[in-house]
Image (cartoon, grey):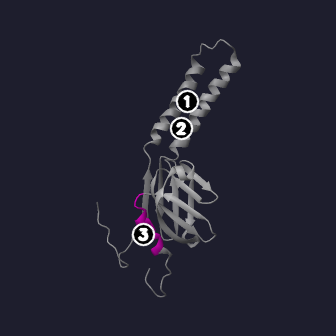
Amino acid sequence: MRDHPHGDNVPHPPVWTGRATNRFQWLLALVGAACLALGIELAVDSAWTTGIAPLAMAVVGCIAAGLLVLFGTLAFVHVALKVDEESLEVRCGHIGLPRRRIPLSSVAGAEVDPHVTPRHWGGWGYRWRPEKGTAVVVRRGEGVRLSLWDGHTFTITVDDAEAAVQIIRDRLRPRTPGAAH
């Protein structure tokens, strides 16, 4: 474990990055791939004798379910958070979609949420709950909760959430006039 220096005089990197990963979702991606393979197998080598309509429905259903589960889980295997001088950027999965960019001028405050769980948010992924706000949840554990000036909240699961919150808070502080940037 690395020691993180504390104090106001500690310079922060120009760009801070963090991420969270959920390896369990690879198992769900395998289930999606299996559904996809079953649909292809039915289409190619079927001994279906009751007609073409049930076969077509089975093939389309398996392929659709497989693609939905496969891409839905791969999109939320991990989340990456990037904080620079002007904004925060949240990117999900290997393609980076969904993606959200939040200007720091829109952030009123940040705090560590030590217990972000998919159960409290209704599952993994990009979630919205009227009483809680919006979240990107890829695993249970610590996260960053942003309070936005428009009254909304945005929560992101990320490793080392305490460091992320400290950097965000430092960048939200107004700079003194004449200070070097």
Q: Earlier in the sequence, mark 1 or mark 2?
A: 1
Image location of residue 29, percent across then percent down:
49, 37
Circle 3: residue type: Pro
Q: Which element carries disc 1, helix, strand or loop?
A: helix
The Cα atoms of the two marked residues, 1 and 3, are separated by 44 Å
Image location of residue 60, percent across then percent down:
64, 28
Q: Which residue is mark 1?
A: 36
Labels 1 & 2 near each other (Cβ < 8 A): yes
Residue at 58% x, 19% y is: 44
Q: Which residue is mark 2?
A: 70
Q: Main secondary structure of the magenta part?
A: helix
Count of numbered circles in the view: 3
Q: Which element carries disc 2, helix, strand or loop?
A: helix
- Residue 29: within the magenta? no
The Cα atoms of the two marked residues, 2 and 3, are separated by 36 Å
Disc 1 crowd rating (10 Å Cα; few below 14, some 14-19, many 20+) is many
Q: Locate the N terminus by quadrant.
A: bottom left
Q: Which element carries disc 3, helix, strand or loop?
A: loop
The image quarter containing residue 129 is bottom right
The boundaries of the magenta stretch are 159-170
Q: Nearer the viewer, mark 2 or mark 3?
A: 2
Image location of residue 88, percent across then percent down:
51, 64
Report the disc number at residue 159: none
Report the disc number at residue 14: 3
The Cα atoms of the two marked residues, 1 and 2, are separated by 9 Å
Q: Is residue 64 above or below residue 167?
A: above
Q: Is residue 145 above or below residue 77?
A: below
Report the side of 105 relative to 166 (left or right): right
